[in-house]
Amino acid sequence: MENKKNTATESNNGVEDFKSGKKASMKSSQLMELFGDGLKDLYWAEKALVKAIPKMIKYATSKELNEALTSHLEETKIHVTRLEEVFSLIGLKAKAEKCDAMEGLIEEASEIMEECEEGSMRDAGIISAAQKVEHYEIASYGTLRQFAETMELTEVEALLATTLQEEKEADLKLSDVAMDAVNIEAAEEAA
């Protein structure tokens, strides 16, 4: 079986030989470039959510939904700060680049809130939209956490894993709110 230290890898700077004991510079690797782009996307997405979640809170009528969204808004503010820490750890300036996927999800949520009748139906729509957001974030944080692990960025990986777990918990909380009351009430309302 071939040992990784006896193979060569290609980076933006060309081929480096691990026989000499030199590791590819993570700052210049293609994976690091992809990682940085993903961070910029998520940074934009989290900052956009800090602005979008209050509208969801305003439109929500369920006390439980309102509490879940309010709690996640506070977590989202922490996610922004945590991403700034990740940028710092890898030596990059925190920079947001427009995330088209998140922009679309936020736009869809706005349309649902404006088109749905106030009450359980709108609350069910808000939960649906919020869970789409959570699923996007779970996929994104999961991918970036794995990139960090691959590049042996232990501290960065731990920060991303913490946020990933919080996003999963927010998704579960939204499911609980939906199943415990909102969806049942929406199903019982006359069209």
Image (spheres, grey):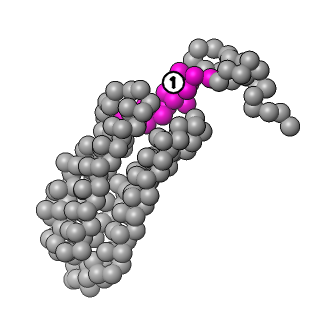
Question: From where the camera sits, is residue 102 visible?
Answer: no
**Is 5 left, or right, of 171 in this rendering?**
right
Image quadrant in which you'd find residue 114: bottom left
Q: Position of residue 48 (x, y in %)?
A: 25, 44
Question: Relative to residue 10, is residue 51 depicted above or below?
Answer: below
Q: Residue furthest right?
A: 1
* Residue depicted at 39% across the width and 58% down the height: 166
**Is 63 left, or right, of 31 in this rendering?**
left
Q: Position of residue 59 (x, y in %)?
A: 15, 64
* Residue depicted at 68% across the width and 17% down the height: 16
Q: Which residue is mark 1?
A: 27
Question: From where the camera sits, is residue 77 visible?
Answer: yes
SS at mark 1 in the image: helix
Q: Position of residue 191 (x, y in %)?
A: 22, 78
Q: Residues within 10 Å of mark 1 (few under 14, many from 20)?
A: some
Q: Which region shows up in magenta?
A: 24-41
* Residue depicted at 20% across the width and 68% down the height: 66
Q: Position of residue 110 (x, y in %)?
A: 21, 54
Question: Relative to residue 77, is residue 116 depicted above or below?
Answer: below
- Is-magenta flag for residue 155? no
- Main SS, magenta residues: helix
Name the residue nearer the viewer: 65 or 104.
Answer: 65
Image quadrant in which you'd find residue 182: bottom left
